[in-house]
Amino acid sequence: MTSESDAYERRSAAPVIAPVRPRKLAKVPFVELSEGRLQGVVSSGSDVERVYVSSITAGDHGLSCNTNNNRPCGGLSGGTRACNHLRALAEAAVAQYGLDRVARYLRVTLPDGAGDLWSGLHTTTAPNRAAEVFSGFLRHLAYLEVPPTADPLPELQWFPAAGAVR
Amino acid sequence: MLADALRSRPAGLDEALALIDGLDDALVHGLARIDEDRAAALESFAAAFTGSPLAGRVSDSIGKVVAGTVTDDHVAVLAGARSALTGAVHDALLAGLDEALGRVREPWAAPAGPAHSGQVLAGGRSWLRELAIAGWRGVDHELANGGAQVVSALLADPAGRRLAVLLDGFSAELRCAAPVATLDRVPVRRWADLWSRAVLLSQETFPAHEAAPADGRFLLLGVDLHEHPTVFRAQAHGLLESPGGGVRLVRTSVAAAKVDTISGPSAWRMLSAFPVFRAALAGQRVVELSGMPLTPGGDLLWDESRAAVGEPADPFAAARVRLGGVSAPAVAPLDRHPAAIAEPVLLEGYTAGEGSFDLGGVTLAVDSDRLPEAGPLTPALVAASTACLGLLRWDGGRWAVQPLAVQATVRKKPVTVHTADWALGPTEAKAAKAEATAGTAVEVLRERAGRLLRR
């Protein structure tokens, strides 16, 4: 008989990824915690053809913000004071994953009662990762163009649809 | 009868699971780091195959792995042997259940069709081998990301979809958990399951099976929803009444690719290519099928042009009249796994408690983790229910029921609620408003894709 203590370890349907919370996507269409960074894409306020690719590294909190055409963001301009794009990115990440999960991933120690990620970030500058992150965003968008299927996909029995946080 | 089956533990079950756990534990630390205890567990695993056709290959592969050589071939043998054990567990559990339910299981008789091949599969195999060598504890960001390229290549080929969907869900979990060395608890059985399913699917010899056209009436029993960050799938369980008079259990499903920010009721929007399917689900309507392909494993391959929606038919009435003694589809040999058991049942006359049903003689757990946000069925409705259509599942050492529909009494009024009631959008004002807001995500992303993708 499986004991209670290792029930999680011996469950085929053990939950691993917490469901993301719904949020508005118009300003920040893409956010992910990946490759040791909080990274994503922020729509430009002035030009519908342009997006900013922003990231914050875990651990040393290195900031980076560039356009999809690889021009440096004027707001950040290589400094350590977050631009509006980075602030929007962090806000979207907190809305999507919750403050605790984002803080844990970035290895941020928040002061007691802090409701804001920035109070715990000691920012540095980081190398430009715009090309990688932008291609990740394009891969993400490409899922919307994958045709649907009626294949029985038996392995989906391992992936129940996300339950509500009721 | 059912109570007995749910309470009993088939002979040899615990021993088989202990062997599986031995292999699974070796995968936690990786095949490159096998200590004495793990080597002993692997040797017992190999010994269990003595006298079977797999004996030679299993003992040879385990010997090589313990000695420090891990090839694609050894990895395939480990996954194959593990699936023989999970298959045996599946058979023992399902046989007991079939007997208790008076369900006649069709024998598997389909010949293996032509398998598919390709360079893409080799990429998948090599990533899966690296994972096995490193072990879950050795998965860092880079190794976790290794699955992404394989998935992109597989998605481009319809024949690669099954493996692509599995690898994408699996690698998303690894990415989320990386670096796994610092994770509190590792889902040992789950990742070993997903890994070994993927290893088998990435063999060129994995068999495909031909579907045959089927006619008749499809009567809906209930709908199960599946999801991971990049897929949403609705799978309907139902009864197929053949023109000849036979009745059998079948399933049919449609799945759409999506992204993680599309979830909950708005995920149904991704299935807009299937208006007939969604209308049948939302209204519990009969579907007349003409020449819809049916696999030997009981899956109708949904085709909108071969389906016509008929009059509403109450799934509870259909289950009361037709579910007893129904014939059930055979299970494809390589799909036999306890976690793949999802047997439709109608439960009545129970006492609903907090998270369980007292069936009289046995307490059956309710799997509340499988009540999706995309539908209106809630734990409170289940707790207030007097009849439940659901799927019997076995996981974590016990049986549980996943409700798909309930008849309940709410504020002294009888209500009936099905998981797919919102297939055409939420029918309740508050949920509809939330869906309308969340649903704009789909439009925003489509607009972004339109502007940025074709450059």
Image (tube, helix red, strand yellow):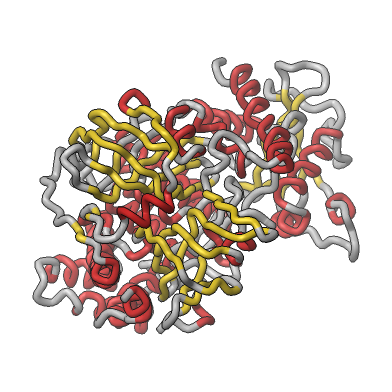
Q: How many marks?
A: 0
Q: Is residue B65 visible?
A: no
Identify the residue at image location x=38%, y=70%.
B24
Position of the N terminus of chain B, as image quadrant, is bottom left
Position of the C terminus of chain B, as image quadrant, is top right
Q: Is residue B21 above or below residue A161?
A: below
The percent coordinates of residue B57 (x first, y second) are 15, 65
In this view of the protein, which residue sits in the foreground, B279 or B194?
B279
The percent coordinates of residue B294 (x first, y second) are 24, 39
For residue B297, side relative to residue A27 (left or right): left
For residue B414, side relative to residue B287 (left or right): right
Identify the residue at image location x=72%, y=24%.
A51
Q: Quadrant of residue B311?
A: top left
Q: Is residue A25 above or below residue A34?
A: above
Identify the residue at image location x=43%, y=33%.
B277
For residue B98, side relative to residue A64 (left or right): left
The percent coordinates of residue B256 (x first, y second) are 47, 35
Identify the residue at image location x=77%, y=50%.
A61
In this view of the protein, which residue sits in the foreground, B424 or A107?
B424
Q: Is residue B411 visible?
A: yes
Q: Quadrant of residue B410?
A: bottom right
The percent coordinates of residue B13 (x first, y second) are 29, 78
